Every structure is written in structure tokens, then in C-alpha cells.
Amino acid sequence: MSTTRTLIRNGLVITAADETHADVLIEDGRIAALAAHGSAVAASWTAGADRTIDATGKYVIPGGVDAHTHMDFPFGGTFSSDDFESGTRAAAWGGTTTIVDFAVQTVGHALREGLDAWHAKADGKCAVDYAFHMIVSDVNDRSLKEMDLLVEEGVTSFKLFMAYPGVLYSDDGRILRAMQRASVSGGLIMMHAENGIAIDVLVEQALARGETDPRHHGEVRKVLLEAEATHRAIQLARVAGAPLYVVHVSAEEAVAELAAARDKGLDVFGETCPQYLFLSTDNLAEPGFEGAKYVCSTPLRPREHQAALWRGLRTDDLQVVSTDHCPFCFTGQKELGRGDFSRIPNGLPGVENRMDLLHQGVVDGHIGRRRWIDIACAAPARMFGLYPRKGTIAPGSDADVVLYDPHAEQTLSATTHHMNVDYSAYEGRTVTGQVETVLSRGEVVIDRRTFTGRAGHGLYTPRSTCQYLN
């Protein structure tokens, strides 16, 4: 069988650990070797390469791993507007080459049914590689047994909700039982930490007062109720002896709970999202009904929380930045909540913007280049059992590689993005840095800002257990 060889020359290779001026040799979809620019070894590769890509002046970075997306996701009587085909194509455009999406168990049904349904949604559609977490909506003896089976076959993380009573909510007893099971099987519990029971009371009271605008979504989902739920989740995990990963952390007080737990040496991890680093309650308060575009849960917070989130990323109290990509069109979907903010579908589009926004964080001095790659590529891959196949550039790793132009300026806009949604949460924002070329398992899927990929290239990728645990 003939070997396909691609050579990437003259770039600055950046991983979470190193920055190296090196040429990268790719054979049959995997990284074969790295060699110093101008070395005899690198020179010897030139003759045998089927394709040579010049990366002069560019960063050569691992493909992004977005560990929190919701493609084709049912919520509030509608579905997120990106399916696996459009969503993974947009991911590729943004330099993300692996997503971990959420399969959903319906109450009264088996975990397996939910997982099979999500396989059916994704199969043959994806432009980049994908894996699944499992949302557990119905904790009972049967679903607890199924959790063990799923871990064995590569679905190693389980999401529970302290929010959304009557829909996805689990009470403390169910959460404790799931955590106890995960502590034995090696599964990782992911938690949406907001006190949904209390929030529902505040929603009802706000609507009774006639407070129906989108900004009230943020006001009822209070910072203290995120911090309280985060604290409670940590204590339940301690009782169960289980690791815990808190999703979409948005507030300084919640970061403080995670930091305190980590200071005790607990296996507690946190994720934040670009929207909490760059947007705020100012967006929710935009005039007319425009604020509906920014309704997500946990909600956007006052601007002063941003500094605490960036600090948490620098100090490793937050390990991962994912998008929680769950887009709904403004026209016809977000509008379901006109006159009642509680009916606005919760979610923002972002899978295409994450790598660029985080690079803007480098430009702005919030994080360094290696930390950018850590929180966007390596840490999510390790957290969810994909490393070093994903998340780094090293011999043996999948050749998921991005050529990134750190000097290109671009303006984010719905008119130019590739997500299937009619607005951008970052409309008109200028950022420095842009994805130029993307390889997924050695195949060029974005070639100098042209999409050359295809639905069905992306493969389902089973995962090992969390690689941060002893």
C-alpha cells in the first residue's frame, strides 16, 4: 500500500508544552516526525512528499478540541439550528477538528436509546471527528448499570443538571447515586451547576411583576445560585469519592468554589466559554428584543466577572474553554420568547469563533500562546480521554493540524460565518488572527480559506477515561 506524505515547512509549531521552529512530516493521516528547520533530516523529507505546505510566518498548531457542543439539540420546543453537517463544517472553518457532543437520555428511556439516536444524527454527516458525552436525565438502577457499559465502550463522561426542573433536572439524591457509580467505573460527572428550583421561583416572580425582557433572564439566574450549586456539587462529589467537571462556569464566586476545592487536592475541574470572557449583561440589555440573541444558561454576567475568569484560566483553576455551541436563529426561534424571557431558547452560536477569540486573549495579554493551545486543544483532549491522539502535534498523534496566521485581522459577522444561524454573538468585533489551512487526520479540509472537506470524513472517536486522574 502506498504511503501518503505531507510536509509542513517553515512554521512555528506551538503545543501546550513547547514552541519549536520545526517542519512536520505527516504519513497516512498521522504525525510521523518533527525536525528542525534546515536540518539534513528535514531536507531529506522534501523529495518524498506528495504535498508540501509552506507555513512561513504562520503558527502550526493542533486542531482544536471543542468538548461541549449541542448539534441538532432539542430545547424549548425547537432544535438547535446547526446539525452535525453544518456544525462540524463551521468547526473546521474555525480550526476545531474534534467536537464532543451530548447525546440525551429521554426520561423513561434507556441511555442506549439516546446514544443510538445521536449516532444516527451524526453518522455520515460530520466534516471533522466527533465523540459523545451522555446526558443522564433519569437516574435509576437500570441507567446506573448502563453507565458502566458506556464507559467500557468509550463514552466516559455523564452530564447531570441541577437546573431545568421537569426537563433535565436531577435532585441531590440522584446526583449522588450517579457520582457513586462513576467513582467505581472511572466515568467523569459533568455538572450544570445552577439552583434550578430557586431560579424557577424567581422566574415566576419576575414575570408576575411584568419583567419580561431578555435582560431579566440574567437577573433571575443569580450568581449566588451558580456558586451555591457549584459548592453543593463539589460536596456531593466528595461524599461519593468521584471526580467532577463543572461546565460553563460564568461567575467569580463559582470560580472561587472550584479554586477552594482544588486547593484541598480534590479532582474538581472547570470549564468556561468565550461568551463569558467577551460578552456581558450589557448584551442582554440591548434595546428592543436584541438581548434575546445572548440568552444562554448559565447567563452572561456583569463585565467585572471577566477578569476573574481570565485569572482562573491563567492559574489553572479553570482548565478548559469550550463553546457550549447551541445556536438558535433570532427569527422564528429566539422570538418564541417575545413577551416572556423564560421561553427564549437558551444557547449561543460559537463553534467557529473559539480559537480566534482565545487567540485575541493572547493578543490582549490575558494568556500566553502555549496556554491558548492548552485550554483549547490539549486540556480538553486529556480531560475527555482523547490525548495524545488529539490535542497535540507529536509522533503518533492524528494529523489534526491548523496553519494559523497570527497577524491577519478579521471582523466577525453573520455575513461571513459558516454556522447555520442568522446572527453572530460577536457581530462587528475585530480580532487579530485567523485560521488559514486545516488538516483533519492528514486530509486538507480548509485550504487557504476554502472549504475542501466533506460530510462523512469525520469519524466517531471512542474515548478513554479522564487522563487527569491517577
Image (tube, rainbow, N blue to C red):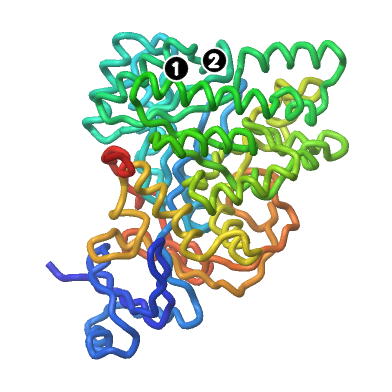
Q: Which residue is mark 2?
A: 167
Residue 73 position in % (x across, y down): 52, 30
Residue 298 position in % (x across, y down): 62, 31
The quarter of the picture where residue 409 lies is: bottom right
**Residue density around tag 1, few if under 14, some if 14–19, many if 20 or more, within 10 Å:** many
- Residue at 50% of width from left, 71% of height from top? 448
Q: Nearer the viewer, residue 91 or 210?
A: 210
Q: Considering the numbered disc 1 on the image, is that residue within a helix, a strand or a loop?
A: loop
The three-letter amino acid code for the residue at tag 1 is Ser
Q: Is residue 352 visible?
A: yes
The quarter of the picture where residue 230 lies is: top right
- Quadrant in the picture for the C terminus: top left
Tell me the number on the disc at residue 256: none
- Residue at 79% of width from left, 31% of height from top? 215
Residue 400 position in % (x across, y down): 36, 60
Q: Considering the numbered disc 2 on the image, is that residue within a helix, a strand or a loop?
A: loop
Q: Is residue 15 left or right of residue 404?
A: left
- Residue at 74% of width from left, 22% of height from top? 220
Residue 98 position in % (x across, y down): 40, 50
Q: Give the vertical position of 186 relative to 376 (above or below).
A: above
The quarter of the picture where residue 156 lies is: top left
- Residue at 56% of width from left, 42% of height from top? 272
Q: Are marks 1 and 2 in contact (CB under 8 Å)?
A: yes
Q: Give the vertical position of 8 relative to 375 (above or below).
A: below
The three-letter amino acid code for the residue at tag 2 is Val
Q: Which residue is mark 1?
A: 137
